[in-house]
Amino acid sequence: MSQPPYYPPPPPPNYGAPYGTGPYPYPAPPPTNGMAIASLICAFLFAPLGIVFGHISLSQIKKSGEEGRGLAIAGLVISYLVTVLSIVVVVASIAFFAWMARELERTGGAGIPRQTTTAAPGNDQLPPFNPPATLGANCQYPATATPADKPVKPPATGKAPTTPATIDATVVTNSGPFVLHLDNAKAPCTVKSFDSLVQQNYFDNTPCHRLTDAPSLYVLQCGDPTGRGSGGPGYRFVNEYPTNQYRPFDPALKQAVRYPRGTLAMANSGPDTNGSQFFIVYRDSMLPPTYTAFGTIDKTGYAVIDDIAAIGIADGADDGKPAKPVIIKSIRLN
């Protein structure tokens, strides 16, 4: 009897072998599309490129059967979202800066409107002064986003005494001298800042850059070393009288009141943005009570201001640079 043929057993499967080897190889998975990976990365680095790579990736995957469709879609979604948000931010920024430019054009950069409204008869006077409980208790002079336009140090923070009630200063201009009576009793933080700037010669050899002869607004504005109407000392401080005689957000703060002839007041570009710019009212003017009145010009100096106003405004306008340059040579405390 013959022996059956001997067949050696098959070798055991090699479970640790890589795809494509061994006696029973498994097919290798398709590779991940490189453009899909690039799309997802570019979504965070440069979104428009992520959109381009995402669409190319989907087209390649459809033809080649590669992996990465999910990555490509994620890259596209993120890229479109980032692009849309970027466009919104750019448009909003352009609108904001356009609005700022219009405001600066409207106000001359000083915060005093070119046109003012009139108040009802009998209701157009500055309010009586009722000293707030915190008057001068804690004067603060925080830095502004823009640096000082002329080297200067801010005043010391803290308490500002309200005595003496009045502090005098002499202004010498190329049109003549006049005396200021600074109202320390009503606006101690403002007077403290003005005194500090005077003692540091901040106002010396600076122009009065704005003169108005518009309906109900007659002021000479000074205190900007640049002469452009946007300069300042690199710090700001809050409004005082007459603003502090009203409740916050009181509608009356938007109603014009009469700033009488001879008033010395701070220019600003919004609530609590006082710096170094000030203006002298040479004829009764109507303004919202949001400009700190911190003194008066002595009546003996009215003639100097009247002469400046009489020369007029450059180009025959009703608001702009004086026709003849007005330069503050010095201001000194008496």
Image: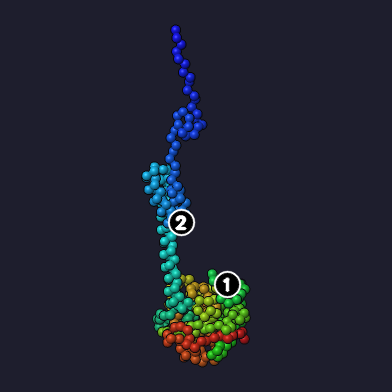
Kind of residue at badge 1: Tyr
Residue 94 visible (yes or no): yes
Classify 10 Å Cα crowding around label 2: few (below 14), some (14-19), many (20 and above).
some
* Disc 2 element: loop
Residue at screen point 54% across, 86% down: 327
Q: Nearer the viewer, residue 110 or 226?
A: 226
Q: Quadrant of the C terminus?
A: bottom right
Q: Measure the alpha-carbon separation of dots 1 and 2.
A: 42 Å
Residue 212: name its quadrant: bottom left
Which residue is denoted by mark 1 in the rendering? 141
Residue at screen point 49% across, 25% down: 12
Residue 155: x %, y % from top left: 61, 75
Which residue is denoted by mark 2 in the rendering? 46
Residue 250: name its quadrant: bottom left
Residue 156: x %, y % from top left: 62, 73
* Mark closer to the observer (1, 2): 2
Kind of residue at badge 2: Phe
Please determine whether, in this image, residue 40 is positioned above or below residue 279: above
* Disc 1 element: loop
- Which color scheme did the rendering employ for the protein? rainbow
Q: Residue furthest top?
A: 1
Residue at screen point 44% across, 77% down: 105
Residue at screen point 43% across, 55% down: 49
Q: Nearer the viewer, residue 100 or 283?
A: 100
Classify 10 Å Cα crowding around label 1: few (below 14), some (14-19), many (20 and above).
many
